Amino acid sequence: MAQRQRKTTAPDARKAPTKPRLSAQDWADAALTAIGEGGLAAVAVEPLAVRLGTTKGSFYWHFANRDALIKAALERWAEINTEGIISEVEAEPDIRTRIRLLFAEAISSASADPLEVSLLATASHPEVAAALRRVTERRVAYVAELFAALGFPEAEARRRGLLAYSVYLGHAQLGHAAPSVLPGEDEFGAYLDEALDVLMAGP
């Protein structure tokens, strides 16, 4: 008597598709979004897990605690909003055009995303204070390098770089606190050019 064949079903057909495992970067990005929306207090594991569609177990796979997540998020912020923007503008060979591109991109990013203003508002937190100091030093040093490339002596390039960065920070703060005092979109280009022309006026 012939042995009856059993029907087999491929294991994959019986299982629901699994979600891709979240990375530490996914958690850091979600934390940055939360900081932009509600400040540092908004970084809480359970709400972030809900936002990411996962469980707290995923968080503890990557981080020992909330402070470790905050540190990773701040490193991610520096990577995206500082090194990322610098890498983009470095492709421009003309220094004056590069300075304009740098500030146009930085101001546009800060105006659209409240994250940086939220971080400045929580500068008393030790991790945030350290990150702001590192990022500020890096940004001012880079802008000073650009002014030095225009021919300004080192000390003067540093002063102008610091002044230019102060203009950026003031614009970012006003963009969220009192946007009505700033020039509109159709005037922004001329406004930025005028401010940078003053700062780049001959060494």
Image (spheres, rainbow, N blue to C red):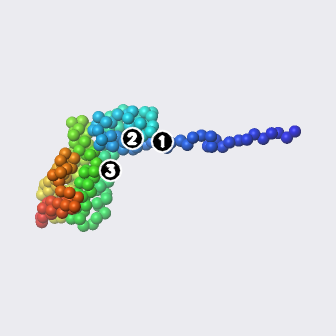
Q: Residue at x 14, y 54 (%)?
A: 163
Task: Mark 1: give few (<14), some (14-19) or many (20+) Cα within 10 Å.
Answer: few
| Residue 138 picture location, percent across and down | 24, 50
The structure residue drawn at horizontal position 30% and vertical position 41%, both measured from the top left corner, is 37
SS class, disc 1: loop
Q: Is residue 8 above or below residue 158?
A: above
Where is residue 184, by image quadrant?
A: bottom left
The answer to which of marks 1 and 3 sits earlier in the sequence is 1
Residue 179: x and y in percent read 19, 50
**Residue that mark 3 sits on:** 80
* Disc 2, SS: helix
Above-or-below relation of 27 to 160: above
Tell me where residue 140 appears, x and y as whole percent.
Answer: 20, 52
Precedes in sequence: disc 2 or disc 1: 1
Residue 22 placement, left or right of 144: right
Give 146 or 58, whichever is nearer the viewer.
58
Nearest to the observer: residue 156 or residue 181: 181
- What residue sits right under mark 1 in the picture? 21
On screen, 45 above or below 162?
Answer: above
Q: Quadrant of residue 50?
A: top left
Residue located at (32% from left, 50% from top): 80
Q: Which residue is mark 2?
A: 27
Contact check, label 3 and label 2, Cβ < 8 Å: no
Residue 122 visible, this orientation: yes
- How many other residues sit within 10 Å of disc 3, few (<14), some (14-19) or many (≥20)? few
Rounded to the nearest angstrom, the CA distance separating label 2 from label 1 is 11 Å
